[in-house]
Amino acid sequence: MTVSAILRARSARPVGSSTGARRALAPSNALTGMRTATDPVTGRIVGRSRRVAAMAERVAVLGAGSWGTTVASLLAPVVPTVLWARDPDLAADLSSGRGNSRYLPGLDLASSLEATADLGVAVTGADMILVAVPTHGFRLVLADACAHLTAGVPVLSLAKGFEQESRLRMTQVAVEVLPDRPVGVLTGPNLAKEILVGKSAAMVVASTDTTTAERLQGLLASDSLRVYTNDDLVGCEIGGAVKNVIALAAGMAEGLDAGDNARATLINRGLAEMTRLGEALGGDPRTLAGLTGMGDLLATCISPQSRNRWVGEQVGRGLDPFEVLAGMNQVVEGVPAAGAVCSLAASAGVEVPIATGVREIFERGREPLEVWADLMARRARPEVG
């Protein structure tokens, strides 16, 4: 039996089925900070929290791509959850139990998950909104939803990137469009298909409001999913956005057959770029050394499931960047993020040579091999400092 199967079986085990072990309620600050049932012998978390879950009566997830659908399916067995899909046909498939064949083919979703193509219906009455639309449509969706939202309802981003014209992070966009409410972000090394089938993973929820972060933490946490909280929105969002840019470069290194040593070097120096920029913008370097920085960077740079890494690899093999992007059915956020990273870095006075190289390939048509040579030819300097 696989690890995932064991964890799923344990989560499904009814209360009281453990051999003589009594379930107890852990203190709110134990382990991950969530109120969860634990085995008093092993201290192991058993199942999802119901006490914290009861604090949310209805959740709306906006955006039915692979990640939005996955998060909605995780929430649906715990709290009434509605998923908004822009495409009425996709919404109909989701509502009828046919799943999301466009983005998650062959994978089952929670039977209790609701879906609609009507944005007003999706958000009306919801006491938590999770926004999983691509960054280029983030502001417009929030503006359209505004008239239907209850005052003070928290809005959390599932997107990883920047608004192109303003260079704002998604929580900054949310504050502009929907002021006077908690905002936050759910992020980390979260490959949708693995999480949907119950493989072990961890993620981070950061919010301007501690209660909001703990509510979502309690709703999502399970035996196979560790959920941490953080109050560093800047660090969490910078990590999630910059890692996509670095993953494009890591994919190109693979396409160029630069070797594993080179790819490891690039990932490490990409982490240095991410940390320099994040710290300059007010983020905590400890955040960028954690799940939302290094963790997400590693998953996105090495996994064959990563869109950004895959696109970079194809470009490194000599394919035209525009043709590769035209063949994608989901947004590759690292491409528009590269320009934003360079702009923010210039304003902050920090160097981001890898992001600069990615931007030059996708925006200015430079050859990946030429950019790689430039990176290797940069002047020698101390590694730290």
Image (spheres, rainbow, N blue to C red):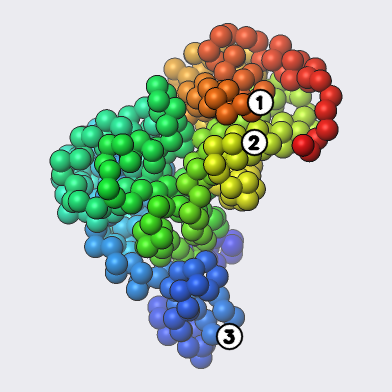
43 relative to 80 in the view: left or right:
right
What is the distance, in whole Å, between disc 2 and disc 1 at their CAs? Answer: 8 Å
Label 2: which residue?
A: 276
Quadrant placement of the N terminus = bottom right
Residue 204 relative to residue 157: left or right = right
The earlier-in-sequence mark between 1 and 3 is 3
SS state under label 2: helix
Residue position for label 1: 351
Where residue 382 appears, as percent x and y from the top left, is 83, 33
Q: How crowded is mark 2: few (under 14 residues within 10 Å), some or many (20 or more)?
A: many
Marks 2,1: beta carbons within 8 A: yes
Bin the neighbour count of mark 1 within 10 Å (Cα to Cα): few under 14, some 14-19, many 20 and up: some
Secondary structure category for the residue under label 1 = loop
Q: What element carries label 3?
A: loop
Any part of residue 178 in sight = yes
Residue 299 lies, in percent from the top left, at 60, 43
Q: In the image shown, does 274 or 22 lie closer to the viewer? A: 274
Number of residues whose C-alpha sits closer than 10 Å to that of mark 3, classed few (under 14), some (14–19) or many (20 or more)? few
* Labelled disc at residue 41: 3
